[in-house]
Amino acid sequence: MRIIILTPMEIERDKLLAALARIENKKHKYEIFVSEIGRESTAKSMMNLPEHDVCILMGFGAIVGKVSNLPESLHLGKPVEITEASIYGYEGGLFENGAPITTRAHLNLPCLHSLTSDKFVRTTDLPEKIVVNMEDYTFMYLKKPQDFIVRIISDFLPHETEIDFFEEVKRIDFFVALNEINMNLE
């Protein structure tokens, strides 16, 4: 199977390449493309991908909640599959024309809801276990049925202290997520 992994940032690509190098028995052929951050960049990238069997959007995602309140499966660096996405408006509510999109799970990972926003979400009234990012809704809207999203938990919202995102994610490894794809995607 020819799998394309679309990722928003170079750092995610680097982590994917490092993880891919550690997988000994690759069941699939993998190609990694960086789309850049944002809904428009994701859409443009999806329109220009080469032929493939499956496209997976994979990258970091902030999750709403305190580490102490979340199960171990939702801690820093843990992979989750996004099976529902909505688009968040500038005023802190769902866009009227952004009805939630749902899809079936493809892997054996926790399945979460994702909010896509054009700017970083600062509100504190979101329910726990929501993933916040800038690309998932566009991907869900344009994807083929076999395509899906895997997010790696990178930080927790609202931030209780100021963080340096790139320092926070240095120790995160994408191996578990990529190995799950390699072993369980048919």
Image (tube, grey):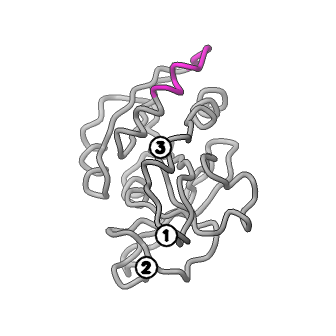
Work out how far the residue at label 1 is from the one at label 2, CA to CA, in angstroms.
Answer: 9 Å
Q: Is residue 106 left or right of residue 68?
A: left
- The segment highlighted magenta reads 17-27
Callout 3 amino acid:
Met
Q: Nearer the viewer, mark 1 or mark 2?
A: 2
Q: Nearer the viewer, mark 1 or mark 3?
A: 3
Q: Which residue appears at 44% of the width and 44% of the height?
A: 57
Callout 1 amino acid:
Pro
**Counting residues from the N terminus, which is met first, the one under dot 1 or under dot 3?**
3
In which image quadrant can residue 14 be found? top left
**Counting residues from the N terminus, which is met first, the one under dot 1 or under dot 2?**
2
Q: Indicate the secondary structure of the residue bearing disc 1.
A: loop
In the depicted structure, whether residue 146 falls above or below residue 30: below
* Residue 94 numbered mark, or none: 2
Whether tag 1 and tag 2 are in contact, CB under 8 A, the answer is yes
Q: Indicate the secondary structure of the residue bearing disc 2.
A: loop
Q: Position of residue 39 (x, y in %)?
A: 31, 58
In the depicted structure, whether residue 119 falls above or below residue 4: below
Q: Indicate the secondary structure of the residue bearing disc 3.
A: strand
| Residue 21 lies in the magenta stretch | yes
Whether tag 1 and tag 3 are in contact, CB under 8 A, the answer is no
Provide the residue designation for mark 3.
Answer: 58
Provide the residue designation for mark 1.
Answer: 100
Q: Which residue appears at 42% of the width and 73% of the height?
A: 121
